[in-house]
Image: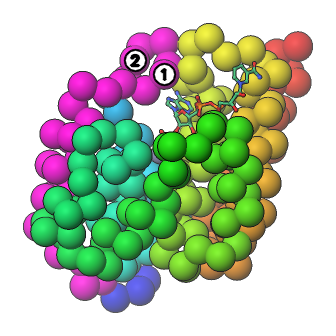
Amino acid sequence: MPRSNVNPGIILAALSFAAAKHRDQRRKDREASPYVNHLIEVSNLLWTIGRVRDENVLTAAILHDTIEDTATTPQEIENAFGKVVLNYVVEVTDDKSLPKPVRKQLQIEHAPHKSPGAKQIKLADKCSNLHDITHSPPFDWSPERKREYFAWAKAVVDGLRGENPALESHFDHLYEAGMKSLSDAE
Ligand code: NDP
Ligand code: ZN
């Protein structure tokens, strides 16, 4: 097991910050689960399966949707968690001024050029989303839409490979299992 220098106080501060920022947001599943569940899941995947022990990466994973999905400013993140964490969060944030299909295409094109930390956060994020689409999907998605998401997520992840083989195999397993359950349901 890699040596851990992770300060639990920073992780708890990030959880507290993210829980407050996302407090009015829900996931898209039928039960409208609290959004923060996804942030906990992404950081937990990095810790347990990815064996990531880099405090900045784990902190940024918890904060990964704050700039994209809430009113959080980059300055707030820098003030509370520092520039390294901010840079990771910015790296995994889409430019919301662009149309959705362009943003999705840019994720595929930009993936290979991300830093190792950002690649691992994106990989864990896609793992969490494939798991959710298989077990607690957006309530109004057709099987076709789920397949489209799977194909797109795989195209992004193929550009992230080489940093964390354990998380990559976990993604491949979720991909196979999710596609199988879609076929079995037909
Ligand atoms: P969205 O981006 O609208 O939704 C997926 C995102 O929602 C995930 O990446 C995840 O993002 C978040 N999310 C919240 N709850 C869940 C959950 N329970 N399970 C999984 N993810 C969840 O969808 P698309 O990626 O499909 O993007 C929209 C695109 O789809 C457009 O380009 C549009 O053209 C197309 N479209 C396709 C349709 C079809 O039937 N094929 C119909 C309508 C649009 P995060 O990690 O950030 O939380
Ligand atoms: Zn996410």
The correct choice, above or below, for 37 with respect to 17 in the image is above
Image quadrant where one finds the C terminus: top right
Q: Residue 51 location, x and y as percent?
A: 47, 73
Q: CA distance from mark 1 to mark 2?
A: 6 Å
Which residue is depicted at the point 81% across and 42% down? 151
Note whether 13 is above or below 145 in the view shown.
below
Residue labelled with disc 1: 28
Residue at 66%, 56% in the rendered image: 107
Image x and y of residue 156, in percent: 72, 56
Tell me the SS state at disc 2: loop
> In the figure, 23 relative to 124: above or below?
above
Residue 30 image offset from top left, x and y in percent: 48, 12
Q: Is residue 10 visible?
A: no
Query: Residue 52 at x, y = what percent?
Result: 44, 74
Q: Is residue 53 left or right of residue 133?
A: left
User: Which contiguous range is marked in magenta?
Assistant: 4-33
Of 88 and 177, nearer the camera is 88
